[in-house]
Image (spheres, rainbow, N blue to C red):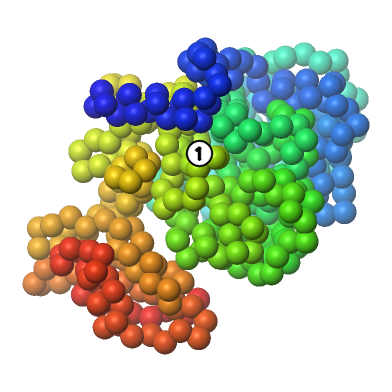
Amino acid sequence: MDSMLEWSRAAWRRHLPNVPDINAFVRELGDGTVHGLAHATAIASPDKVAVRLGDEVITHGELDSLAGRHAASLGISPGDRVLLAAPVSLSWLGAYLGILRAGGIAVLANPAYTQAELEGIVKAAAPALVLREISRPDAEQQPWNEHAAPDSVALLAFTSGTTGKPKGVPLTHRNLLISIRAAMAAWRWKRYDRLVHALPLFHQHGLGGLHATLIAGSSLHLLPRFDPEELLRAAEKATVLFAVPTMYQRLEGKPAGDRLRLCVSGSAPLSRTVARHAEEVLGRAPLVRYGTTESGLDTSQVISDPPADTVGIPLPGVELRLGEDGEIQLRGPQVAAAFVESDGWFRTGDIGHLDEATGHLVIDGRTKEMIITSGMKVYPREVEVALEAHPDVAEAAVAGLANERWGEQVTAWVVMRPGAPFDAGRLIQHASTLLAPYKRPKEIKRMES
């Protein structure tokens, strides 16, 4: 385990080679509050565009003023929870910051949730206020007054628990700030950067992009929905792109400009095929990062490294070790305290190993997804990666099906690339060159994309 901690700290130096005292640097990243840093940006750059949403734009100064009016009109007290389940809009941005500015706790939900799904969140969160529609507030902005502290809970993020019921994760301002600011430092984020994404703000991936924009004083072009052509057009004027693998997979053509310096992929595994496709379209391969709702951003590929089939190495401040069966365990100030066990570590439920060639982390799957076949353990993601290495396979999914002979049979489903023929025997033969016999799929089925 000591060697893993040494590896983690060496990783910090890979990300930030010019920072002499990384521990002190990380501690300072947690100073302040999300809305407080956004307010400081508004004072420094009031006329700079903060967010473009469709045909609407709002400057940092205007957004700060809007947040102040929302804070005055909400009628909440510090510590109150407010469920924000409205469609994204500039008013949504003001309401979110207004909740934080009033000392409240934001509970973000998908506006497409059914009434039954929303009731589950309401039951779990017990909010003082539910906002399903947001209009511009009539209240006058009050003088700036800080109602929260770095260790105040800022966000109650919901994720599916093992029972399928929503699980609330209380994240403090310190958790959120250290998580995104460590990544910003590793990714060399500057105030001149312009981010584009079509990710939902009720999800940590999209929300992190908003936080980075407000903290750095940069700009965000937010697309209300994903459209491949619109995203590519927006990317012409962007320096940073956030997307998930399915979005990268659907991009076609090339952006007219060459300003993009960084493309980030997360929230799901990025196959080698999709990474190559994204590089062909965008001119650079996506940088892959890994994180969880409970622990924020945890690992990232090094910005100066060539592309690799890994999720990189621990971000500054993150300590990582592999427990029994390769379970990824995390420790650091970005982890929600409620999920830290008595030994000081958060157990993610994700399985991983270190790549021999690069020393970087590779995600193999979830502990719950592990296949036991003939008494041997098989991680589905390892088999999926092997199948996706075939040039004709666009995507693969692997699971264990009940079988009298093996206990569980390794079974795969594949989506073929356009025009490619499907031949299960040929794919099994391909897998046999990369996998031990017990890991190879016994059956491969075709799925349409």
Tell me if residue 285 comes above or below residue 427 in the rendering: above
Instruction: Determine the image quadrant of residue 210.
Output: top right
- Which residue is depicted at the point 31% across and 42% down? 354
How crowded pointer 1 is (Cα within 10 Å; few <14, some 14-19, many 20+) is rated as many
x and y percent of residue 375 in the render?
9, 58
Camera-side residue: 121 or 315?
Answer: 315
In this rendering, position of residue 306 left or right of residue 72:
left
Q: Position of residue 381 (x, y in %)?
A: 33, 58
Residue picked out by circle 1: 302
Horizontally, residue 89 falls left or right of residue 435, namely: right
Point 40% across, 24% down: residue: 9
Q: Is residue 252 left or right of residue 387?
A: right
Q: Position of residue 250 (x, y in %)?
A: 60, 68
- Give whichever of 322, 349 is nearer the camera: 322
Along the line of sight, the residue nearer the viewer: 30 or 17: 17
Q: Position of residue 171 (x, y in %)?
A: 53, 29
